[in-house]
Image: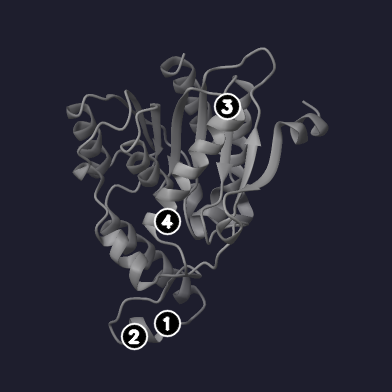
């Protein structure tokens, strides 16, 4: 496919109220392969967003070539959307997912949705899907299942990164929680949101079809899969060894092709 064709596949635009306008890219489905299910990509947050950006765009292109209309977007206070990076809350980002879902349905004319998310985007996708009745599929790529474990993981990465530069933040030196994680602020409100995040506490089936995809099997994701099966979702849990692109040096711009292909294959089979 030529570069001009690639450019036509993606239409950048802003949507929502001017004070909280969100940036998005819409990928039209390939001609002659239209499906009635639109796919919304929910990105990770902070440093993980930066590191996974190229792979997320490649995923959108592959899904659109398979016949799915795709929308990827930035949450409020993230990327190219309005707002500062210390203004994000999980409640706001869930509202952004709802707004992006409506925008995707309007642009594509699709009756059904599939929400796909990586890391914290996976948690947002599941929580948003559990509030809707039009979500046919849910794809969770290395989802954040427990918010406290997620914060602890990022805190370790933050500490290790600082040690590489022979620095230690005053907050950590005094035993306090860090005020930032890998260059992005950790506000009191966001910390409170994350500490309450626990996906196995979901009480409503988010989708009939669910994919959980990991590079190494984890107890938390296995617990989540069992919980979703108990709610009546048909869960496919796949383990595909691959780089942890959200934790890699962003200069590498890694694209885990087997993972992306597994997601497209699942979408083709689960969302006819």
Residue drawn at (39%, 31%) of the image: 138
Is label 3 or label 4 in front? 4
- The quarter of the picture where residue 19 lies is bottom right
Q: Which residue occupies the foreground of this view, 178 or 7?
A: 7
- Disc 3 vs disc 4: Cβ atoms closer than 8 Å? no
Res 180 → quadrant: bottom left
Mark 4 touches mark 1? (CB < 8 Å): no
Q: Residue furthest left?
A: 230
Q: Which residue is mark 3?
A: 63
Residue 44 appears at what percent x and percent y?
47, 50
Give coordinates of residue 96: x percent, y percent.
Answer: 47, 49
Spatial separation of the CA atoms under disc 4 and disc 2? 32 Å
Circles 1, 2 touching at the beta carbon (< 8 Å): yes
Q: Is residue 97 in sight in this rendering?
A: yes
Residue 129, above or below 194:
above
Q: Residues within 10 Å of mark 1 (few under 14, many from 20)?
A: some
Is there a contact, CB below 8 Å, between mark 3 and mark 1? Answer: no
57 vs 53: above or below = above
- Residue located beneath label 4 in the image: 92
3D distance between C-alphas at marks 3 and 2? 46 Å
> Label 1 to label 2, Cα distance in Å?
7 Å
Per the model, the C-alpha gap separating discs 3 and 1 is 43 Å
Give the CA distance from mark 3 to mark 4: 27 Å
Q: CA distance from mark 4 to mark 1?
A: 32 Å
Tell me what residue is drawn at x 33 percent, y 62 percent: 151
């Amino acid at each position: 496919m030529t570069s001009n064709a690639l450019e036509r596949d993606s239409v950048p635009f802003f949507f929502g109220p001017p004070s909280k306008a969100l940036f998005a890219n819409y990928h039209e489905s390939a001609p002659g392969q239209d499906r009635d299910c639109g796919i919304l990509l929910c990105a990770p947050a902070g440093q993980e967003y930066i590191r996974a950006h190229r792979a997320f765009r490649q995923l959108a292109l592959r899904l659109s070539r398979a016949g799915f209309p795709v929308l990827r977007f930035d949450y409020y206070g993230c990327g190219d959307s309005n707002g500062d990076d210390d203004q994000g809350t999980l409640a706001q980002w869930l509202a952004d997912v709802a707004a992006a879902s409506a925008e995707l349905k309007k642009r594509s004319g699709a009756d059904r949705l599939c929400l796909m998310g990586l890391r914290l985007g996976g948690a947002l996708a599941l929580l948003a899907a559990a509030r809707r009745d039009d979500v046919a599929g849910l794809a969770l790529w290395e989802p954040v299942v427990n918010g406290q474990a997620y914060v602890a993981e990022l805190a370790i990465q933050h500490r290790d990164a600082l040690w590489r530069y022979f620095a230690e933040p005053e907050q950590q030196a005094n035993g306090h929680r860090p005020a930032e994680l890998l260059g992005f602020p950790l506000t009191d409100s966001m910390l409170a949101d994350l500490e309450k995040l626990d996906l196995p506490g979901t009480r409503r089936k988010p989708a009939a079809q669910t994919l959980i995809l990991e590079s190494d099997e984890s107890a938390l994701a296995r617990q989540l899969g069992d919980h979703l099966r108990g709610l009546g979702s048909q869960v496919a849990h796949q383990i595909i060894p691959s780089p942890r692109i959200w934790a890699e040096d962003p200069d590498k711009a890694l694209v885990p092709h087997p993972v992306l292909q597994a997601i497209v294959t699942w979408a083709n089979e689960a969302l006819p």
